[in-house]
Image (cartoon, rainbow, N blue to C red):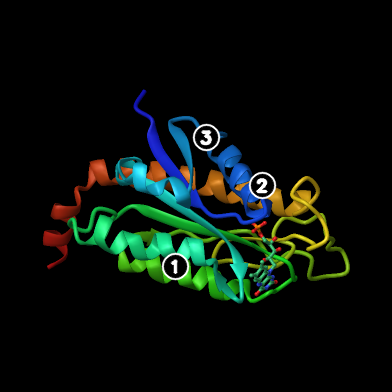
Amino acid sequence: MIHQRIAIVYHSGYGHTGRQAEAVRAGIEEVDGVEAVLLTVDKVERHWDDLNAAQAIIFGSPTYMGAVSASFKAFQEATSNAVLARGYLWKDKIAAGFTTSGSRSGDKLSTLIQMMIFAAQHGMHWVGLDLPPANCSSTGSEEDMNRLGFWLGAAAQANTDEGPETAPPASDLATARYLGRRVALTTLQFVRGRQAVPLQYALVAHD
Ligand SMILES: Cc1cc2nc3c(=O)[nH]c(=O)nc-3n(C[C@H](O)[C@H](O)[C@H](O)COP(=O)(O)O)c2cc1C
């Protein structure tokens, strides 16, 4: 069976977002017919081909100062020459994102929006979370998936006095795992759908 490749490219200064990235990978690996490639942004210069060959790319960054980290931003800017200028190489790939911060909100939404705009600039298709509202009623709890209530991507919160061995908590890692699985299933639907209806044909038929 041909395996569709799904890449995860992320930065983690202190390891918390790294735990989230591992959880996303575990979710991808729950799905038959796909394989996960996990890359940190500092390795990207030697791995552009892996990203270009992937059917989906999932972006991950801690939230620093209400935005993606400087290292993740440097990766984003490097794609201008390495990907866009070489001919829109990521066009029509699936995209998604995840982020960890110290506070419950911590302005993580800003980070996910930055990632979504970045994906749109590359002509990618953004996949969000389809989890229902969680931890928002008298029956909700910290153990709920999507306990922080994000839909653009997977959000996690890691207490700043805890190391990555104990933070983020299991519920946030389960949310990240769920996102990985969702992206894997969406990617298979998209790739197989594209085989049935080639993009060229779809555009002509629409005109
Ligand atoms: C430079 C810097 C800026 C930060 N800015 C924020 C922030 O804006 N909001 C927030 O909630 N946490 C903030 N934090 C806390 C981190 O998001 C948190 O410690 C996170 O778990 C770090 O992830 P990492 O271990 O993957 O680097 C900041 C931490 C650093 C070092």
Q: Which mark is residue 100?
A: none
Upstream in the sequence, badge 1 or badge 3?
3
- Along the line of sight, the residue nearer the viewer: 138 or 12: 12
**How many marks are shown on the rendered structure?**
3
Quadrant of the image containing the C terminus: bottom left
Does any atom of ligand 1 lie closer than 8 Å to the CB of label 2? no
| Residue under numbered circle 2 | 19
Can residue 91 be seen in the rendering of this structure?
no
| Residue under numbered circle 1 | 116
- Along the line of sight, the residue nearer the viewer: 104 or 200: 104
The disc labelled 3 sits on which kind of residue? Val
Residue 149 at what x, y percent from top left?
Answer: 68, 68
Quadrant of the image containing the N terminus: top left
Which SS class for mark 1?
helix
Farthest residue to the right: give it.
138
The disc labelled 1 sits on which kind of residue? Met
Q: Are marks 2 and 3 in contact (CB under 8 Å)?
A: no
Upstream in the sequence, badge 1 or badge 2?
2
Residue 78 at what x, y percent from top left?
Answer: 34, 61
| Residue under numbered circle 3 | 31
